[in-house]
Amino acid sequence: MKLTKLFPVAMSMACAIMLSSCSKEDAQTPQPLVESANGHSSAKTNAGEVVESPYFPATTGVKGFEKYPTGWTKLVGPNPSIPAGSSSLTSLWGLENWSNSVNPQWIKPLLPATGNPVESSFITVKSFAETSAETNDKSGALTTIKNLKPGKMYTITFYVATTTVAGLSGNGETSVAAASAEIKMLNVNSGMTTTKINFGGLQATWVKKTITFTAQADNAKFVFSGLTPLGNVYSYIHLFVDRNSIVEFIPFQPMVVQ
């Protein structure tokens, strides 16, 4: 008789505990979803197929005149004589000595863009151009962002900077801080986008930039160049991309409570 009386009470308590647990779980705040990757990694779906992660090549690993990191190349333009390549935090093309007229060391050295001293190299381009239309007067660098899904949104994050060297170049122009960096992307949004990042007088300071785009194809072209503030001078402009610089962006959707 005692067990018979206690059984309904125990069941009631168990149900109360379960309801309390369920109500707390349902009340958790939903979080936005972001999938991050930047290497040649892949994952399997439930169907067993291999899906490659989005890939935005990093700019580290090499230094030198006309040398570029894996996945990057010089932009083929109308004036191939304007140089580009990869530099160090302390000097142009990573050189120690160049000539009596130009010291390759930056007047003001850079710090690592992300605080990691191992990532101490980056792409450098040179510009005599004041406007985007002056394509003959600047060099550029190009890469392909791969493994995209058409119609999906992605976010890329990178850093740009400008530095100067002492002395004059061979033809007499003066090295000055750049006015802006310029990014062109193809196969995104409505076809092509242009993003200008103004330095505002900052020198040897990394400026962080994030761009969100919708992929039109399974790849997108990324072109980097820059502009000077006035004529008869030249500027060096730098680009740093780390190894985790692209994420698939999934817009936040609030949970609907029935």
Image (cartoon, helix red, strand yellow):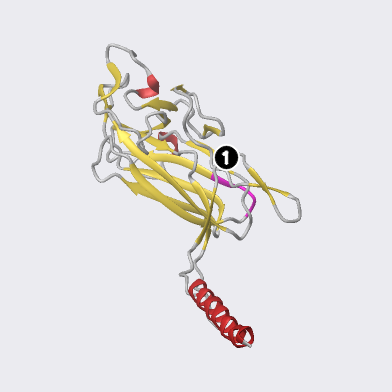
Q: Main secondary structure of the magenta part?
A: loop
**Which residue occupies the foreground of this view, 123 or 15?**
15
Dot 1 surroundings within 10 Å: few (below 14), some, or many (20 or more)?
Answer: some
Q: Is residue 220 above or below residue 77?
A: below
Residue at point 41%, 32% (across, down):
125
Left or right: 46 in relation to 153: right
Disc 1: which residue: 39
Boundaries of the magenta span: 217-221
Rendering quarter of residue 99 = top left
Question: Which quadrant is home to the N terminus?
Answer: bottom right
Q: Is residue 27 above or below residue 225?
A: below
Left or right: 90 in relation to 224: left
Magenta-span inclusion, residue 220: yes
Residue 63 is situated, as x and y percent measured from the top left of the image, at: 44, 23
Magenta-span inclusion, residue 86: no
Left or right: 8 in relation to 162: right
Rendering quarter of residue 258 = bottom right
Residue 17 is situated, as x and y percent measured from the top left of the image, at: 53, 77
Residue 116 is situated, as x and y percent measured from the top left of the image, at: 38, 33
Residue at point 45%, 40% (across, down):
224
